[in-house]
Amino acid sequence: MMGIAPLTTTVVGSYPSTPALSSLFRYCREGADPYAESLRIAVDAQLSAGVEIVSDGQTRNDMVRLFATKLSGIRMRAKPVIIGDIAHKSPITAEDQKVARSMLGGRAKLKGIITGPYTLAMSCADQHYGSAEKAAMAFAEALNSEARILSGLVDVLQVDEPFFSVEFPEYSESLVSTVFSGVHVPKALHVCGDVGRIFGRLVELPVDILDHEFAAHPELLDVVSDIDFSQMLGYGCVRSDLNVAESVAEISERIKKGVACVGHKRLVLDPDCGLRHLSPDVARAKLENMVKARNMVIQDES
Ligand SMILES: [Zn+2]
């Protein structure tokens, strides 16, 4: 499906961000990019683990600030405040995608990631639109400009909407289709948390991959097996909330359960969520063990 091989390994997106002191000094002295090094470390770690669809590591900021600081209409406070019309000013993550791409040497594909309009709207204080729906739709329009740019730079484009598992809006389909409008690469939607209650609604959304946390919420497999859906399943098989790497055996058991439920052809494997809050060694080990576990499952099958 969509040129994505069965049991392909990928990431949700974020990776520990640790600008080295030396790069911060260089930044102060020469204005060099303090995150250039953490981007390289993130991509390198994914490549050497053998991950097949990698990200830029989103090391510049957390998922909300990464986008909120770059859109117009927002004043940055502890909680960002919408003070005017939200608009896309200039490419937000495109340069980092180009750097990541230049490191791949054809060894992996590249995933672009956009924080979803609903999650951004729910993470900001609104002094302008007066309705969550209007704010979210404005974010969706602005993010579509970013999506169209990324569509020419990446192999897969993912929208992250963690807030969907907190509250699923009636207008979710227009948000998702607005962000992805004009995008011609496979489209993924990542929703973390417990999506058991809303999985039946998520399958109606116009995306190619639905990505969820099956390691932290193994009971989701029961829900998934009761519902007909056409998308591939992004199968979180590594915990992203525990700062300890699971063994290869433990991860391969999880993968086998997923395969038994939906078949290997429809599974894409990744950690449950972003790895930003883990220590770099643990994040690296989780990716390495995930790829080894996948290889073990394939070997056992053949
Ligand atoms: Zn997540």
Image (spheres, rainbow, N blue to C red):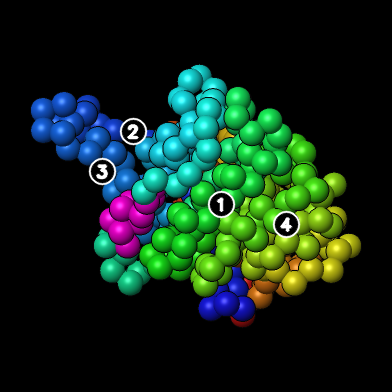
Q: Is residue 170 above or below residue 182?
A: above
- Residue at the disc numbered 2: 18
Real-space Cα distance between discs 4 and 1?
13 Å
- Residue at the disc numbered 3: 36
Real-space Cα distance between discs 4 and 3?
36 Å
Which mark is first along the chain, 1 or 2?
2
Q: Mark 2: which amino acid?
A: Thr
Q: Nearer the viewer, mark 2 or mark 1?
A: 1
Q: Mark 4: which amino acid?
A: Glu
Contact between labelled residues 2 and 4, with CB atoms less than 8 Å apart:
no
Which mark is first along the chain, 3 or 2?
2
Q: Would you say the beta carbon of the disc 3 residue lies within 8 angstroms of ligand 1?
A: no
What's drawn in magenta, residue-wise? Answer: 91-101
Which mark is first along the chain, 1 or 4?
1
Task: Find numbered disc 3 in the image and state the secondary structure of the residue it sits on.
Answer: helix
| Residue 141: percent from left, percent from top | 56, 52
From the viewer's perspective, tell me whether residue 91 is left or right of residue 173: left
Q: Is residue 262 above or below residue 281?
A: below
Q: Mark 1: which amino acid?
A: Glu
Which mark is first along the chain, 1 or 3?
3
Q: Nearer the viewer, mark 2 or mark 3?
A: 3
Q: Mark 3: which amino acid?
A: Ala
Q: Is residue 256 magenta?
A: no
Instruction: Using the image as rendered, state which of residue 272 and residue 242 is in the foreground.
Output: 272
From the viewer's perspective, tell me whether residue 142 is left or right of residue 251: left
Contact between labelled residues 1 and 3, with CB atoms less than 8 Å apart:
no
Quarter containing the C terminus: bottom right
Residue count near mark 3 (Cα–Cα under 10 Å), binned few <14, some 14–19, many ≥20:
some
Real-space Cα distance between discs 2 and 1?
32 Å
